[in-house]
Image (spheres, rainbow, N blue to C red):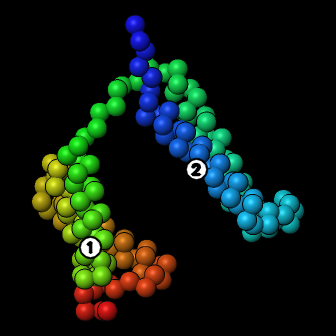
Amino acid sequence: MKTQRDIPDVIGGLLMAGTGLFFAVYGHMHYETGTAARMGPGYFPVLLGWVLAVLGLLVAIPAWWRRGEPVKVQWNNLFWCVLSLLVFALALHLLGVVLAAFIAALVSLVPSAMAMRTRLVVCAVVALLTTLIFPIGLQMILPIWPWSH
């Protein structure tokens, strides 16, 4: 009898390890790391990269021997999620961050069973957080409203 491995955890752990390894090696090659007493600009990213790589292996290795459920792709949810990203990308410069984020969140919630009032509240919170983080917090040059070009 063939044992079904815990594939989502194996893949997730390996992706974590690969991402951590990439940032650790890239940071070491492109930035001065320094020492623990006198840290350079690459010290912390390299350290975090190695920590992420080790944590990824700690997730992936045990999952290789653990029995798991087979992967079931939810095509309907995937379709609406990708469509919401496309809607956001196409609407961003035309409608601004607030409306584009609101509409994209609304599109992503199409397959959801939540009530319309709850959906609208979630979309408003997503739009608010997107606006606070990107144009305001990170000071990205993006139109907030359609008329603010």
**Image coords of residue 30 (percent x, y):** 73, 65
Image quadrant assignment for residue 123: bottom left
Mark 2 crowd level (few <14, some 14–19, many ≥20, 10 Å Cα): some
Mark 1 crowd level (few <14, some 14–19, many ≥20, 10 Å Cα): few
**Image coords of residue 52 (percent x, y):** 62, 47
Image side of residue 103 versus residue 18, left or right:
left
Asked if residue 136 can be seen in this view, the reply is no
Q: Quadrant of the N terminus?
A: top left
Q: What residue lies at 80% left-to-right and 63% top-to-bottom? A: 33
The amino acid beneath tag 1 is Leu
The amino acid beneath tag 2 is Thr
Image quadrant assignment for residue 43: bottom right
Tell me the tag on residue 90. 1
Element at badge 1? Answer: helix
- When the figure is inspected, residue 135 is found, relative to residue 2, above or below; the finding is below
- When the figure is inspected, residue 46 is found, relative to residue 15, above or below; the finding is below
Image side of residue 49 versus residue 5, left or right:
right
Q: Quadrant of the C terminus?
A: bottom left
Image quadrant assignment for residue 69: top left
Q: What residue lies at 69% left-to-right and 54% top-to-bottom? A: 24
- Which is nearer the N-term, disc 1 or disc 2? 2
**Image coords of residue 36 (percent x, y):** 84, 59
- When the figure is inspected, residue 134 is found, relative to residue 69, above or below; the finding is below
Q: What residue lies at 55% left-to-right and 33% top-to-bottom? A: 60
Which residue is under mark 2?
Answer: 19
Element at badge 2? Answer: helix
Image side of residue 87 versus residue 128, left or right:
left
Q: CA distance from mark 1 to mark 2?
A: 29 Å
Do the CB atoms of the residues marked 1 and 2 lie less than 8 Å apart? Answer: no
